[in-house]
Image (tube, helix red, strand yellow):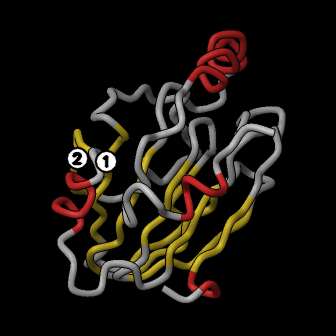
Amino acid sequence: MKKEMIKTLYFGDDGKIPNNAFYPLILYRAALENHDAMALFNKSNWTNAWQNGVFPYHHYHSNTHEVLAIVKGEASITFGGEKGETIRVEEGDVVVIPAGVGHKREQASSDFLVVGAYPDGRDHDLRTGEPNERPTVLENIQNVPVPKFDPVFGVDGPLKKSWTKQ
């Protein structure tokens, strides 16, 4: 995969959505060509998979990272909370979302379908940025381990190179 096909984005705490101070969101453009998303993720031990869409409200997971593969259609998704960045994703793209990073579907084609999964099949919580979440989620986010494998490229993937605590 060409370097320009990989984009990393950092999002700071916006006061409501904590985002992640250590790890960037990674966008892999056209990463699924000729790949079955669930099989690819399973190979790298990103399991507990599901198929659906992306919620139309800002939310995040404080206790795990998440990978989203766009398997059909296209959508605009805002990452990083209300002050974040809206990104157009399309069939074949994969987004690796660090724990704490907000995401919200802004619009989608009628056939939009996502496969999501979590490293080591971790269970995930659903947080929306409520003030009473703060003390617990900030600690949770700091304690989520770096995955052993990049969900697309395995042991030597870009995630392993860019997800190191400074």
Residue 143 found in image quarter? top right
Are there few (<14), some (14-19), or many (20+) residues within 10 Å of tag 1?
many
Residue matched to label 1: 117
Which quadrant, please, contains the C terminus? Answer: top right
Q: What is the x, y in percent for residue 73?
A: 32, 82
In the image, which disc is placed on residue 135? none
In the image, 71 versus 145, the foreground residue is 145
In the image, 146 versus 128, the foreground residue is 146
Residue 137 found in image quarter? top right
- Nearest to N terminus: mark 1 or mark 2: 2
Where disc 2 sits, the SS reads strand
Work out how far the residue at label 1 is from the one at label 2, CA to CA, in angstroms: 4 Å
Where disc 1 sits, the SS reads strand
Q: What is the x, y in percent for residue 43?
A: 22, 55
In the image, which disc is placed on residue 49? 2
In the image, 145 versus 127, the foreground residue is 145
Given contact means CB atoms under 8 Å apart, are the residues at marks 1 and 2 in contact?
Answer: yes
Q: In this view, does 62 lie to the left or right of 81?
A: left
Q: What is the x, y in percent for residue 17?
A: 71, 37
Amino acid at pointer 1: Ala
Residue at image location 29% in from the left, 78% down from the top? 110
Residue 140 found in image quarter? top right
Whether residue 54 is visible here, answered yes or no, is no
